Image (cartoon, coloured by chain):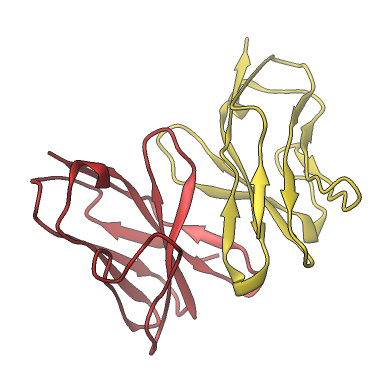
Amino acid sequence: AQRVTQPEKLLSVFKGAPVELKCNYSYSGSPELFWYVQYSRQRLQLLLRHISRESIKGFTADLNKGETSFHLKKPFAQEEDSAMYYCALGGGAQKLVFGQGTRLTINP
Amino acid sequence: SAVISQKPSRDICQRGTSLTIQCQVDSQVTMMFWYRQQPGQSLTLIATANQGSEATYESGFVIDKFPISRPNLTFSTLTVSNMSPEDSSIYLCSSKTGYNEQFFGPGTRLTVL
């Protein structure tokens, strides 16, 4: 079975501090991992996908198959990063399984 | 990426009635998905809607309660039937690109009294 765990429901950091949102997954096949973000009053949007190994808005995420993790990181948080972040796992049947989400608050 | 719209954006309905939610994509897509997001919860997949075939429902969701139509490659509907207050949620549709990433509509906020 596919499962995604985001252990922190809430995360609060100060502006300029590093941010790490944790995501662990469980899947027996070859995983595809994504990070989605939902800003206040906006729709859910794709932030990162592991396959492209890109940096978006200063965020990066590395797939660690040994630790079955896909943590989202940013070295210096900005106030506009405050949002709800969801880790999602794609695998069999081409559907996505979402984690519970982490609400990130950046304090000035 | 695909641009997805949903109608209605929100509705307040009476117990026992049904509501049909429409989802329109600005390009042809093979796979569309319907999710439910209950208050304070994450997204849960209801079903996958493929054009020209019956929708595939996830465990805990049945066609009688959530009938889905997919008449063409740009449009789908989800009906929430015989509603109860427990059906109060945000309902979202999404479409999948060739990279297996999904793009989401703005959601329909449903309140059942």
Left/right of residue A73 with respect to residue B37 in the rendered view: right
Q: Is residue A89 above or below residue B90?
A: below
Q: Is residue B67 above or below residue B73?
A: above
User: What shade has chain B been given?
Assistant: red
Q: Residue furthest right?
A: A66
In-front residue for pair A99/A18: A99
Q: Residue furthest bottom?
A: B52
Place of residue A34 in the rendered image (x, y in percent of width and height, measured from the top left)? 68, 53
Q: Is residue B46 above or below residue A67?
A: below
Quadrant of the rendering where the C terminus of chain A is positioned: top right
Place of residue A88 in the rendered image (x, y in percent of width and height, measured from the top left)? 63, 51
Q: Residue furthest top?
A: A108
Place of residue A61 in the rendered image (x, y in percent of width and height, measured from the top left)? 79, 44
Residue A53: name its quadrant: bottom right
User: What shade has chain A been given?
Assistant: yellow
In percent of the image, x 34 and y 60: which residue is there? B5
In percent of the image, x 78 and y 23: which residue is there? A76
In percent of the image, x 84 and y 50: which residue is there? A63
Place of residue A93 in the rendered image (x, y in percent of width and height, measured from the top left)? 60, 73
Could you tell me how many numbered marks the image carries? 0
Quadrant of the rendering where the N terminus of chain A is positioned: bottom right
Q: Is residue A106 above or below residue A50?
A: above
In percent of the image, x 63 and y 75: which residue is there? B98
Left/right of residue A73 with respect to residue B80 in the rendered view: right
In-front residue for pair B54/A60: B54
